[in-house]
Amino acid sequence: RRAAAAAAAARRAGASGGTMNTFFSPAGGGLFLGEICANTSNTPQAWYNPGEGGDWIDVFLNISPFAWAYLGLALSLGLSVLGAAWGVWATGTSLVGAAVKAPRIKSKNLVSVIFCEATAIFGVIISIILLGKVSTDGNAAILEKNCASVFFGGYSIFWAGFSVGVTNLASGITVGVSGSGCALADAQDSSLFVKILIVEIFGSALSIFGLIIGIIQSQNADFTTN
Amino acid sequence: MVVVFQKPGGLSTFNMHDGFAEALVRGFRLGFLSENDYRSILQCENLSDVKLNLQESDYGSFLADVNEVTPSIVREKALEKLVAEFKYLRSIADEPLASFLDYITYDYMIDNVMLLLKATLNNPDVDVVALLKQTHPLGQFDESVYKSIVAFENSAKGYAELYQSVLIDTPIGKYFGRFLAEESHKASQDASAVQNLLDNMPTTKLEASLRKLYLEDFMHFCQVLGGETGDFVTELLKARADAAAINITLNSFGTRLNEPESRRNERMALYPSIGNLYPEGIDKLSDVGDESELASILRTYPVYRVIFDKHQRGDKTIDDAFYEREVELNELAFEGQFNYACFYSYVRLKEQEIRNLVWICECIVQRQKERTNDHFVPIFSHDSDFRKQK
């Protein structure tokens, strides 16, 4: 298998002659593609013409799916927490300022902060779910597994994490900005609190959409099939 | 040229730096006297009852250490409360909010300088300490500045000296500098005209020019800040500029400035170059000779037509009509969140409230409560004229 991979690499190196080719297709054909997936029945190699030489598909196919999976994990957690923190910053300053002259608002308006916090918790939940789907066997043990499903697993976990992260970012900022308005309105007239809370609830629903879709996206990710 | 390194944030980033300050101002908004407060004050027979009634409001025990309450003491103490709140805001403010709040105080600095200049010109041996008590607390200078103003001599050279030695270091020094530069430019063309003007009405021209330069500078600053702050505060400043232009014209009737040869030369230079009246309205205003001409020009501006009609019918003085308009605009400024307009409006509305309070106290002291509505402008009230017409 190594010989075939080397031959494939040499063919590619000879055919294009461009600098990208030699950089992204090192001798040996690149670790993941050349060594691990070469000549298996469902390899991505079947998806492109080897004679054409190095191309962007070489770049992507040589990135380990584990890189994609853990990047998705980081995005889901990091962006969710960024959104939640931004929201708490926006609503917390208004809450503290308005409570100076209207101290009665301070307990009720903590609900806004809690809604922002919930966004971060959704991010953590998804991260844990996604983490469970990634096999801990590592690159070497993938040798026996189905190459296509490994790639699918990596990509689906990345995009699930990304969609959850970005929706939670948007939701966190939304809840923060409307929570700020809620605190100020409550200070002026306490009957407004419940009405504006409904706006915040709708803002919070955005992160739930992300959660649902993220779970569906990553449902079939499975690093472990043979 | 104004350099602003940090601009106020937009919808999602404003609270990062200025959220606490804005929420604080909106808390202070809760402290405005309501219709019920005014009604209960109006039922008082003397000022000690007023003091008791005000204890229920946000003013609380602001008159606590005062034995003999007079309207001027009420004004002084109410201003102290405003200054305490303003200083608190200023102390927690980040840039550029801090610069914005400073700009608000320059207005009162101009008032204070003009107060001292006028007093000195009328009476060279004026009592500085008594004068200092009348200055507005929001625009305070060092005492040395005040002493130098009192000691200056009334001549072109005197103004230049005053500027170089003392005023150049104050924040309003740049307005003085620009005014003197323009005057010396004119003097190089026609020396007698300047001396004439300084002899006859130095303070009117000086005050109008300083106010004009200040409004233009503030407007430029707000436009550099941009965003909603730029939009809203410039509207408020434009209204002030228009009021200034119309007032200058109205006050010039019967004085030297109204003579046909000095209308374009001198009076036009006092009009601010910002505002809804600028440039066509200002152009037309420059030729106006009496009230009927003024009325015919203002007919094309619906807002000012209404205001001038009230003045001509005698319902309200022109000042009160403009105060009502200002209150209407400043109340609207509180409608939008995440901009600086509420800070400016808060100070202006508080000033109006203090005027209201002092006027009511005067009416009570002189036992003429029926005259209360002459100079009273309701704030955040459903009784406001502009609300009732809707």
Image: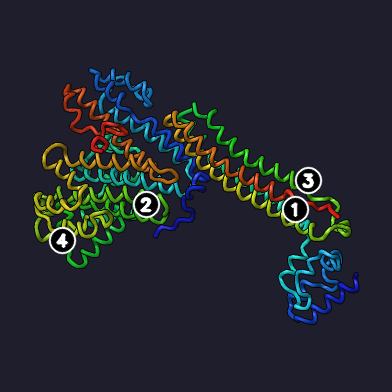
Q: Position of residue B373 (x, y in %)?
A: 19, 30
Q: Residue under circle 3?
A: A132
Above or below B66: residue B153: below
Provide the residue designation for mark 4.
Answer: B264
**Residue shown at the point (24%, 57%) measured from the top left:** B278
Kindly identify the residue that appears in the image at 17 percent across and 64 percent down: B191
Residue at x-position 60% and y-position 48%: A167
The residue type indicated by label 1 comes to Tyr
Do marks 3 and 4 share a chain? no
Disc nearer the start of the sequence (3/1): 1
Q: Is residue B57 left or right of residue A135?
A: left
Q: Amino acid at mark 3?
A: Gly
Mark closer to the observer (4, 2): 2
Q: Secondary structure at mark 4?
A: helix
Lower sequence index among marks 4 and 2: 2
Find the distance from the CA under tag 4 to the CA under tag 2.
31 Å
Q: Secondary structure at mark 1?
A: helix
- Tell me the chain of label 4: B
The image's mark for residue A70 is: 1
